[in-house]
Image (cartoon, grey):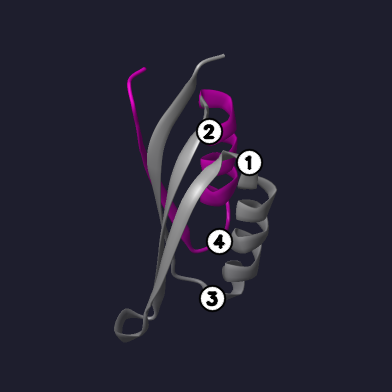
Amino acid sequence: MNKRIGVVAIIVENKESVEKVNKLLSEFADSIVGRMGIPYKEKDVSVISIIVDGTNDEIGALTGRLGRLDGVSVKSALTQK
């Protein structure tokens, strides 16, 4: 399968989900090139962006599992090739 490069944006509104998000990101560490997380205290949310390099299935599994967590929103953009 072809690997694709992309970016995944994660917004965590439920602080109880932060540990679960970090655990999932650790599980998918092989597909993650880089990560930046910013706590936005004024809005009481955390914003995380990750650069990924993986197959559609790998990236889809990560974003799907993240999106099922309570108070977590996920969007991704991937290269075409």
Q: How crowded is mark 2: few (under 14 residues within 10 Å), some or many (20 or more)?
A: few
Secondary structure under tag 1 reads helix
Q: Name the residue under label 1.
A: 30
Query: Is residue 18 covered in magenta?
Result: no
Mark 3 and mark 2: Cα distance apart in space: 23 Å
Q: What stretch is highlighted in magenta?
A: 56-81
| In front: label 3 or label 1 | 1
Mark 4 and mark 2: Cα distance apart in space: 18 Å
Q: Name the residue under label 2.
A: 60
Q: Quadrant of the C terminus?
A: top left
Q: Which amino acid does label 3 sit on?
A: Lys
72 over 17 or under it: above or below: above
| Residue 70: mark | 4
Residue with the most extreme front position? 33
Q: What residue type is labelled 2?
A: Gly
Q: Could you tell whether 38 is left or right of 52 in the image?
A: left
Labels 4 and 2: the sequence-earlier one: 2
Q: What residue type is labelled 1?
A: Asp
Image spot of residue 11 (x, y percent): 41, 61
Secondary structure under tag 3 reads helix
Labels 3 and 2: the sequence-earlier one: 3
Q: What residue type is labelled 4?
A: Asp
Q: Mark 3 points at which residue?
A: 15
